[in-house]
Amino acid sequence: MTDIYYNHKEIESKWQKKWEADKLYRAVIDNSKPKHYALTMLPYPSGDLHIGHWFSMIPPDTRARFMRMKGYNVMFPMGFDAFGLPAENAAIKDGIHPMKRTFQNIDRMRTQMKTMGAMFDWEREAISASPEYYKWTEWFFIQLYKQGLAYRKMSAVDWCPNCNTTLAREQVWGDDRHCERCGTPVIKKDLDQWFFKATQYADELLNFDGIDWPERVKTLQTNWIDRSEGAEVKFQIASNQSELIIVFTTRPDTLWGATFMVFSPEHPLVEKITTPENKAAVEEYKAQAARQTEIQRRAVDKEKTGVFTGAYAVNPVNQARIPIWIADYVMMSYGTGAIMAVPAHDERDFAFAKKYKLPIVPVIKPEVESDANAAEMNAAFVGSGVMVNSGLLNGTKVNTEKGRKNPSIAAVLDWLTQKGIGKESVNYRYRDWLISRQRYWGAPIPMVNCEIHGWNPVPDDQLPVTLPEDVEWRPTGESPLKLHPTWKNTTCPVCGEAAVRETDTMDTFMCSSWYHLRYLSPHYDKGPFDEAEYNYWMPVDTYTGGIEHATMHLLYTRFFHKALRDAGIVEGHEPMLQLRNQGMVLGEDGDKMSKSKGNVIAPDVLVNKYGADSVRAYIMFFARWEMGAPWDSQGIEGSVRWIRRVWTLFTDSPTDSVTDSRIETDSKTDEVKKNLRRKVHQTLRKVTRDFENFEFNTIISSLMELMNEMYKAREAGAAARASAEWSEALEIYLKMMAPATPHIAEELWSYLGKPYSVHQQQWPTVDEAATKEDSIELPVQINGKVRDRITVPAEATEEEIKFTALALETVQKFLEGKEPKKVIVANRRLVSIVV
RNA sequence: GCCGAAGUGGCGGAAUAGGCAGACGCGCACGACUCAAAAUCGUGUUCCCAACGGGAAUGAGGGUUCGAUUCCCUCCUUCGGCACCA
């Protein structure tokens, strides 16, 4: 029977206290060791830790611990992304100040996190909502402003006219888009807001050289930025020579076929150019386009609609007068908000032209056909061929490549530049980063507006601009900063006269774009980070988090780093060298976990019942980390049993009761010991590799397998007479367990009488010689089917293996006296005979 | 529609470099222990014919190969992203 009862509560709290007291996980600069900065995305302090947090934090924790045992000086910090809408919305409901609620939640979550037994260095904790943090968020805003990267622009937000406030996307409900709070239909409202010129870095952001990031993330970012090469072409308005309209096109080689132009209904020029007789129809269409938002967008029937403005433009390549229409299939937010329409070679333009009986002029024809005939076209032609009806450029070859790789596009680009009509141009779907939020609970934008001197940054010595605490919560959700009687009143940094503060706060992605820098020195007050810490720890070596941040946070943080690099604040082109994403833990029903569905798994309950080590082991074991899976409450029993059986293996000592009679001969036990040692080192090799590759589930299964072997080996006498092999097995086993299940590993390490702490041990080295098999067993296939197997000495030659296999009775039976057609010994792993 | 990821037992999943499919675990079945149960330990557990033995099987179909979960082509399903992008 087990001498000592496995009491997870006692063991876990004992070691957690000791590790904390000993500062075992404190990460300090140590130039004698290589550093490893392991970063995992910081949580929003929602109130309670859920199992998803464990899934995102524990496997990276085990890997950080592994790296530490491999000899690296590891920093694994944790903090809170503490600004944001939920706390503000809650405040509007119950009046509890977001500051109070947020910091209460943080305390609660920190306490819960400590039960994980993770190696977080809490002395490096950073909280984005604390003034010592957001002082520097504000400072960074000013640095970007000084770099010329911040600017103001009118931009539409979703606005509730009843609540008099901006709504976030999740606050707009239903197909009719009404306010979540009062049900009023939401309108678009143009507000003057702050932007960062992220698009200035678009090309650089498409370059992933030197970083080890998942292909999936790189593809998502590439598609998000969506670079397209083409040309900008100038068109004149026929009735008004001074008005120029620039269009972007990816097909400048079809310019001669542009038979009309289409403006987005919101285009500012529409009002100017519309002729009086078309005014009513245009206004009507504009109003209708403004009303239809998501609803119409999602409509399956994509019937093109539009109206004629009465105005004409001049096609600069052939001076043709072409009508200007407006249509909602042209977006103000993409390109220049106006297109040249080439119905012969664009499907949308074709459909539009057919509907409104606009001319179709083909300017590319397939090489094989003698003539292009507009009347016979029943679809736009987008294939390759040659240019026709295009003046001097007739006969130029056209292929389906984009940009200059296409000879026709290259020819037209040169021609346009030469004539001064247009120029080569690149367009992106990616937009500048909208920073302004009409909210209270965020970092204030440190800008002051003076009637004379306009916008100026708050001087450094006045940072941070702190959020006022005496604020009023209107049930409407209007920003309390606007309503505060005095807060916005200040003086102009230039002239000292009365001026007003910006009352908008920053997007929280701003806070999370640099938190990896704040961890370096969270309480440092002479700058955003301590240079010495920066020089030692940066860049981040391993960054882990959910795939859902692929296009927002991860792109913002890369942009931010590059902007800081150009400001001379940081070095290197990328902030995070390696990125890995975990999947999602779903509810037991296979749905996303949510309070409303009632399928949320609370880790507290599991820790209490089974202990942190068992939960940690199961978190690693139950799914592929990069995939995620639905939670299975029953499955945890397997991990619990593993932990208990390990405990029993170490603390129970049936070796004493195994009499020598059961150990038949010394040579036989020697064999058992040798086999045990082989298994130990094979497992070590596998576990080491799996840690390196983020394959956490097979680490646990390998350890389970080895434990099963150890039970058998001990039964066969491997542990008798204090054998060196058995001692080594125990020691290596605990070292391999230590990253995954730190508490029980530490307890059993001390039980064996080893010096504290198992977490300060070196990761063991694989004895390659010990992993070699004495003999190998090979399956023998006949015509692709396994019919028998042979065992040969490990050093047997291919010829010997063939000979042994062919001598088999089974093989002879199949051969029926004939010669085999082919005999293959594949990698000394299998014999394949073809008869 | 476009881009991406994934389809393996009842379930989660495993399978260096193209070489024994189903490691490890859950669940289930049977057995031991027990007055009994739980716990624990042991045995079995892809499916079909089932006795030996044989056959089929990694979403479907095809191809390359002595040999394919793995490589190639076509298709289906699920999930994620983008979507009138000029």
Image (spheres, coloured by chain):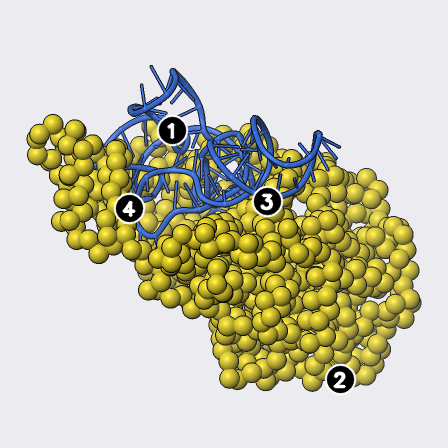
Name the secondary structure under disc 4.
Answer: strand
The amino acid type, in three-letter code, at marker 3 is Gly
* Same chain, labels 1 and 4: yes
The amino acid type, in three-letter code, at marker 4 is Glu
- Tag shown at residue A781: none
Say if residue A647 shows up in the picture.
Answer: yes
Q: Give left or right: position of A12 versus A621.
A: right
Q: Give left or right: position of A599 versus A566.
A: right
User: Which residue is found at the position 86% from the left and 53% from the top?
Assistant: A92
The amino acid type, in three-letter code, at marker 2 is Asp
Dot 2 falls on which chain? A
- Tag shown at residue A461: 2
CA gap between label 1 and label 4 equals: 68 Å
Which residue is the site of mark 1? A378
CA gap between label 4 and label 2 equals: 76 Å
CA gap between label 1 and label 3 equals: 65 Å
* Mark 3 or mark 4: whose residue is earlier in sequence: 3
Question: Chain B's shade in the image?
Answer: blue
Dot 1 falls on which chain? A
Chain identifier, yellow in the render: A
Q: Give left or right: position of A122 versus A450.
A: left
* Quadrant position of residue A500: bottom right
Q: Residue A172, percent across and down?
A: 73, 44
Which residue is the site of mark 3? A638
Which residue is the site of mark 4? A777
CA gap between label 3 and label 2 equals: 59 Å
* Mark 1 or mark 3: whose residue is earlier in sequence: 1
Q: Give left or right: position of A366 versus A358.
A: left
* Mark 3 or mark 2: whose residue is earlier in sequence: 2
